[in-house]
Image (cartoon, rainbow, N blue to C red):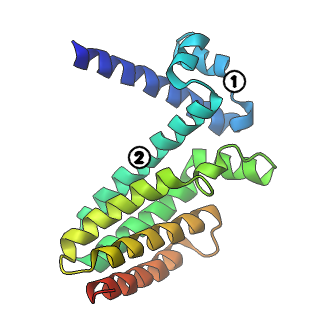
Amino acid sequence: MGEFRDAARQRLRNSIVDAARAQTVAGGWDGVRMGEVAGAAGVSRQTVYNEFGSKAGLAEALARHEVDRFVTDVRANLDAHGDDIPAGAYAAISHTLAAAADNPLLKAILTSARGGSDELLPYLTTRAELVLTEATGALLDWATVRLPAADPAALAFAADTIVRLVVSHIVLPRSPVDRTARTLTDLTLTLFGGAGRGG
């Protein structure tokens, strides 16, 4: 019975987050209203507040939902290449950059920030603990299996550095995705190589 309740509540939360995502994509985060989110999700405004506490709480849930999707894809791209570290690293980095470039929510966040509204942007930059923790964990899990002799601290630092660089290129891209992905892959191999030699 408890599992059924938990599943039902998760479906409820997902429907609210999906409604908030759609409104953010359509008109930016500033235009999102809790009552309109509730209406789109088919629940009361009070239910939205009960689940998320505030608009800031909903923003955090929206950011987590998007990060979870990205990290799931990162893990899949890393694992798809077995022990081929260069291929796995390139696949994960290039997919992440390309998916971010085409992600309508991310575009809405960055466009809003350039227009002076940055309520969601901190979840990618100054308050990016969620992104960094989840993505670094995925990369570190993968690298630890493939480089078992590597120094753990050096490997953790390498993974954290790589993720920070990828995020910076998502927020402010400078080159085509393929070129950026190849450069970041080369850097990944250098950092992992250093960790494999003991840091």
Question: Height in image: 70 above or below 25?
Answer: below
* Mark linked to residue 45: none
* Image quadrant occupied by the C terminus: bottom left
**Residue 50: horizontal and vertical position, in percent?**
53, 17
Secondary structure under the numbered disc 1 in the rendered image = loop
- Name the residue located 47 percent from the left edge and 75 percent from the top edge: 181
Q: Residue 141: x, y in percent?
A: 27, 63
Q: Is any part of residue 145 visible from this angle?
A: yes
Residue that appears at 57% across and 74% down: 176
Left of 116 or right of it: where is 58?
left
Q: Quadrant of residue 33?
A: top right
Residue in front for this viewpoint, 123 or 186: 123
Q: How many marks?
A: 2
Q: Position of residue 65 (x, y in %)?
A: 46, 40
| Relative to 69, 143 lies left or right | left
- Whole-percent x, y for residue 183 in the image: 48, 82
Residues at marks 1 and 2 touching, judged by CB atoms closer than 8 Å = no
Say whether residue 83 is visible: no
Quarter occupied by the N terminus:
top left
How far apart marks 1 and 2 lie (CA) works out to: 24 Å
User: What amino acid is found at the position of numbered circle 1 in the picture?
Assistant: Arg
Considering every residue shown, the one lying at the far right of the view is 116
- Whether residue 37 is situated above or below residue 133 in the rendered picture: above
Q: In the picture provided, is 60 more to the left or to the right than 72?
A: right
Residue at the far front: name it: 153
- Which residue has dot 2 on it? 69
Residue at the spot 59% in from the left edge and 36% down from the top edge:
59
Q: Name the residue type under label 2.
A: Arg
Mark sitting earlier along the chain (1/2): 1
Residue nearest the viewer, comparing 178 with 110: 110
Tag 2, which secondary structure?
helix
Report which residue position mark 1 lands on.
33
